[in-house]
Amino acid sequence: MTDDGASRWAWAEIDLDALAHNIGAVRTAAAPAGVWAVVKADAYGHGAVAVGAAALDAGCDGLCVALTAEGVALRRAGIEAPILVLSEQPPEHAPALVAHRLTPTVTTAEAIDALACAGRGTRDGIGVHVKVDTGMHRVGAAPADVPALVARIAAATPAVRLQGIFTHLAVADEVDDPYTSRQLAAFDEVLDALPPDVLDGVVVHAGNSAGGLAHPGARRAFVRVGIAMYGISPGAGVDALAAVLRPVLSLRARVSFVKRLAAGSRLSYGLRHQLRRDANVATVPLGYADGVRRGLSNVGDVLIGGRRRRIVGSVTMDQLMVDCGDDDVRRGDEVVLIGRQGDERITAEEWAARLGTIGYEIVCSIGPRVPRRLIGTPPAAGPAPRQ
């Protein structure tokens, strides 16, 4: 078989069986609440179309995105399930939100008016969710403003319909922090202040991954499962509950070059690593343009031949180097940067700990130059994911 140049000796494997397992675990924990899959940021770097289709096949009732464009891309890929856009979009996006049957979040009168204009004359109008700021203070309507927003939606019906009300939790992964209970109490006060008939048929939701796993009071109509779906713990406070999860993504490559270098040789940009002994040094064709952070230089490990090997010298844009000692390592050998090889495993959480960040950032940073390869059971129905 000839290579047309589109393939690469580096790839990320996306395990759809692990994804289904994780969704099942969250569904069990959250029951009787439903589960919606958060596939923003290209499904946290895993591939939104493939993951979205697989998540729906595994029992999720809908999908969540951050941007209008993300929802439009899913619709164009053939996904017909409900898609909630989690934050208010610019008013000029209203026609696209209506045309692609996305479910907008609203927090201001301006957004409601724009959607009412775009939805006028459509058969069913557009359903919206009101987001309430109960204490995270990122986005959301102030609790005191919610009744007026709900009344404005009612006045715009049928062009705009109130479909949901939700909030977002700031410290759900810190299970002993009372702030989550205070947020939920504030949310309930908002709901109680609304006329009872307003909430008829309206879905109420509050739980993210940590909320769904650790806080029964946050589960409500459905849980918005994000990082847990990808097999990464939402935070140290819920590690025990997340232990059942399986990592979905592994990052792999092949050795592209091997050289024998003498003790004293200095490596890569800046010559910041010096070999203490003769060694076989392998080059791996992944770098910081692909999400292998420069901060892993001289401190991160990879797996080759089932053994941990240290990244040596500065990680460069497209390549990195590995000290393999006297072991016989050859061009074409598999390298695992995140994932399992033999009895050894490197996780996104391990990278995060070395870099002073969180697992979310690690997987989201794996760039588009890295092909995603699906493994496991494909969805029974839905769009054919692009490879």
Image: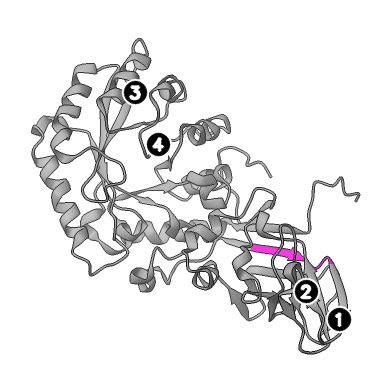
Tag 3 residue: 126
Q: Amino acid at mark 4?
A: Val
Image-quadrant location for residue 289: bottom right
* Residue 140 x/y as whole percent: 27, 40
Q: Earlier in the sequence, mark 1 or mark 3?
A: 3
Residue 180 visible from this viewpoint? yes
Whether 48 is among the magenta residues is no
| Foreground: disc 4 or disc 1 | 1
| Foreground: disc 1 or disc 3 | 1
- 360 vs 387, left or right, is left
* Residue 188 x/y as whole percent: 14, 47
**Which range is magenta?**
251-256
Distance between the alpha carbons at the discs numbered 1 and 2: 10 Å
Numbered disc 1: secondary structure:
strand
Distance between the alpha carbons at the discs numbered 2 and 3: 59 Å
| Foreground: disc 1 or disc 2 | 2
Distance between the alpha carbons at the discs numbered 2 and 4: 47 Å
Q: Crowding at label 2, few (<14), some or many (≥20) Cα neighbours within 10 Å? A: some
Q: Amino acid at mark 2?
A: Leu
Residue 231 visible from this viewpoint? no
Q: Residue furthest front?
A: 270
Numbered disc 2: secondary structure:
strand
* Residue 206 x/y as whole percent: 27, 49
Q: Earlier in the sequence, mark 3 or mark 4?
A: 4
Numbered disc 3: secondary structure:
strand
* Residue 223 x/y as whole percent: 33, 51
Tag 4 residue: 85
Distance between the alpha carbons at the discs numbered 4 and 1: 53 Å
Q: Amino acid at mark 1?
A: Leu
- Find residue 267 and name its label: 2
